[in-house]
Image (cartoon, grey):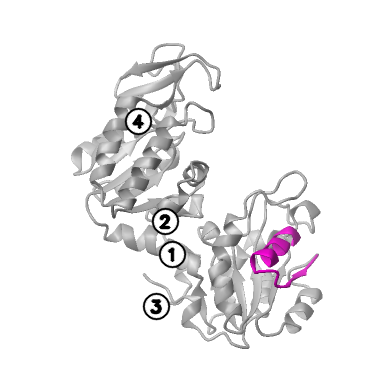
Amino acid sequence: MPKKTIEHVEVASSTVLMRVDFNVPLDDAGQITDDLRIRMALPSIKSVIDRGGRLILISHLGRPEGKGVEPSLSLKPIADRLGQLLDGAKVRFVPDDCVGSQATEAVAALSDGQVLVLENLRFDAGEKKGDKEFAAKLAALAHIYCNDAFGTAHRNDASMVAVPQAMSGKPRVAGLLMDKELSFLSETLRSPKKPFVAVLGGAKVSDKLGVLHNLMGKVDTILMGGAMSYTLLKALGFDMGSSMVQLGMLKQAQQIIDEAAASPTDLILPNDHVCGKQISRMTPMKICKDSIESGWMGLDIGPETVSQFVEEIRKAKTILWNGPMGVFETKPFDVGTKQIAEAIAQATDSGAVSIIGGGETAAAVDEFGLAERFSHISTGGGASLQMLEGKEFASVNLLEKA
């Protein structure tokens, strides 16, 4: 269901509390190594400050214990980087506490068009607990609530659920990134252009069971690669050598195979594999057809499988991709993933809608320099998976309908 966005509300001289996902990676020196999530929030941020709104940004970072300030997980570097991305605009920052007197005073001192970043929400145990008292203090800071944190949309943290509940009667809207995520991952999948092809990979079939069941009968073809395919091939009776196989999932794997056979969805598994003795750049390599010999492990899809997958992708009008085709982090086992990425990019160039489901897949296409050639790359790995499973999010349901 489409939601009202921040652009649907008047923000001039009003204070907006915006939940963003600034959970960015930091190196040992506390420097940001990838600011994509900050950059993705800029359209919503600019929408508020360019129209004279007073903006409070709240986020978590990492996994603090909830016992107070942990300097290595402070949002201060993020606030500094945001200021740079806003062309040197001053971004105010409140250290130590996100709901104390310093925060209240800093909010009261905001002028129209100014931005304030509060300290890491998870320094307070109330955030993870969904505490209503903690949420009420945050809610009291603003006139408008905006959720632009799709990456945590599947969580029931205080800032995601209890805060908008406490702000009942006030505008509660989606940010522009949240709106885009919902549009692609929910609305597009409800009425996709056909043929609709899903490319699924990754290590564990257990991580994708819900997605597989939800997509059966909705997509025309599922192309499965990565280690998760070895569990299904094992269930079909193929030897998988030393490959990663979830032996405890063979029954569920057979159920997926049977479900696909009974549905209009074609399930295509790899028929050849790039194998090595170990996950190493220097390991001996060979191509195994169908089964994998003892002492060898599958580390990428083989050339015949790549050709078959590419042919299906070329025919597609809607493409969903979640999970790499092999151990792409270790060359030369990145080839299959890269060739699939290039094929999807080419299909997108020709008019197909392509959706990348976050996580490792997003990292792979970014590493290959292809990120700009996809219709949408999700910022939320866990959230996108749960949405693809068809689950509803309390945080999203609390936002106003368009």
The span from disc 3 to disc 1 (Cα, nearest Å) is 14 Å
In this figure, which residue is indicated by the disc labeled 3?
402
Amino acid carrying mark 1 in the image: Lys
> Which one is in front in this view, the residue at disc 4 or the one at disc 1?
1
User: x%, y% of residue 225?
Assistant: 37, 33
Rendering coords of residue 69 (x, y %): 80, 58
Q: What element carries label 3?
A: loop
- Reading the image, the residue beneath label 1 is 180
Task: Residue 15: tell me if it is visible.
Answer: yes
Can you say whether 245 is above or below 125 in the image?
above
Q: Does the magenta portion include 201?
A: no
The quadrant in which residue 109 appears is bottom right
Q: Which residue is denoted by mark 2 in the rendering?
A: 376
Given the image, on which type of amino acid does mark 4 rest?
Lys
Q: In this view, does 141 lie above or below 367?
A: below
- Residue at the bottom extreme? 13
Q: Do the residues labelled 1 and 2 touch (CB within 8 Å)?
A: yes
What residue is at 77 percent from the left and 51 percent from the top? 72
Contact (Cβ within 8 Å) of mark 4 with mark 1: no
Give the residue at x 47% y 44%.
365
Residues at marks 2 and 3, CA–CA distance in whole angstroms: 22 Å
User: In this orientation, which residue lies closer to the viewer: 254 or 274?
Assistant: 274
The numbered mark, 3 or 4, whose residue comes first in the sequence reads 4
- What's the CA distance linking mark 1 and mark 2? 8 Å
- Number of the front mark, 2 or 3: 2
Above or below, 182 against 163 in this view is: above
Q: What element carries label 2?
A: strand
Image vertical order of residue 352 relative to residue 137, above or below: above
Of the image marks 4 and 2, the number of the one nearer the N terminus: 4
